[in-house]
Amino acid sequence: MNKFWVLILFLIISPIIGGLYGGLHDQFTYTISPEYYTKFKFYQFGLMDMGNEAIFPNPRIEVFAVGFMATWWMGLPIGLILGLVGLVHSEWKDMFNVTIKAIIITITVAFITGLIGLGFGYFFLSNQPITEFENWYLPENLVDYKNFIRVGSMHNFSYLGGLIGLISGIIYSIKEKNRLKNL
């Protein structure tokens, strides 16, 4: 196998990894605020029509679908960028191993940043009066706005975490190139 095929492999698997991450991430946030999905995300992703809050037999399937659809595409540029950076490695095996670890770093940083967002939502945002969220989409029939805000904060921070994680993965890959060169 050569490095070109490793790059192609990452272009194929990274969107799948990104989608799986999103699906699992949303399982976690659904536990905190089901309304974030039943009154917002399910509409946003076309799983139900506005004003029709249908009861799904197993909403977790739809939650996973929403998470997958929301993040698979982030896997593509992350896989492309980390794969291209991985080309600096002299051997395809090094490229593969280091790039896999760089993807894991990216995901880990994104998740931790999301947790920071959840904490920010919990300790700061959700304690603000609802009038402070005029720029947010808040459904009129929202029952638990505090958890809705907390989950929204986590989602927003998670996208930022993806960018910070990507930068961290790039730095890791370059440092590993230098380390492997000196062995």
Image (cartoon, grey):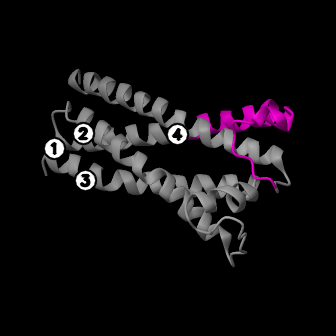
Few, some or many C-alpha atoms within 10 Å of disc 3 (few <14, some 14-19, many ≥20)?
Answer: some
Front in this rendered view, residue 155 or 97: 155
As for residue 135 lying within the magenta part, the answer is yes
Front in this rendered view, residue 80 or 44: 44
The reply to whether dot 1 and dot 2 touch (C-beta < 8 Å) is yes
Quadrant of the drawing holding the C terminus: top left
Q: Quadrant of residue 43?
A: bottom right
Q: Main secondary structure of the magenta part?
A: helix
Q: Quadrant of residue 94?
A: top left
What span is colored magenta in the figure?
111-140
Mark carried by residue 3: 1
Whether 37 is drawn above or below 76: the answer is: below
- For marks 1 and 2, the one nearer the N-term is 1
Residue drawn at x 20%, y 30% is 88
As for residue 131 lying within the magenta part, the answer is yes
- For marks 1 and 4, the one nearer the N-term is 1
Q: As shown in the figure, which amino acid type bears the numbered disc 1?
A: Lys
Residue drawn at x 48%, y 37% is 162
Give the CA separation, mark 1 to mark 4.
25 Å
- Mark 2 — residue? 95
The reply to whether dot 4 and dot 3 touch (C-beta < 8 Å) is no
| Secondary structure of residue under mark 1 | helix
Front in this rendered view, residue 131 or 19: 131
Q: As shown in the figure, which amino acid type bears the numbered disc 2?
A: Met
Q: As shown in the figure, which amino acid type bears the numbered disc 4?
A: Thr
- Mark 4 — residue? 108
Q: As shown in the figure, which amino acid type bears the numbered disc 3?
A: Leu
Mark carried by residue 9: 3
Few, some or many C-alpha atoms within 10 Å of disc 1 (few <14, some 14-19, many ≥20)?
Answer: many
Residue 102 lies, in percent from the top left, at: 38, 37
Residue 8 lies, in percent from the top left, at: 21, 51
Give the CA separation, mark 2 to mark 3.
12 Å
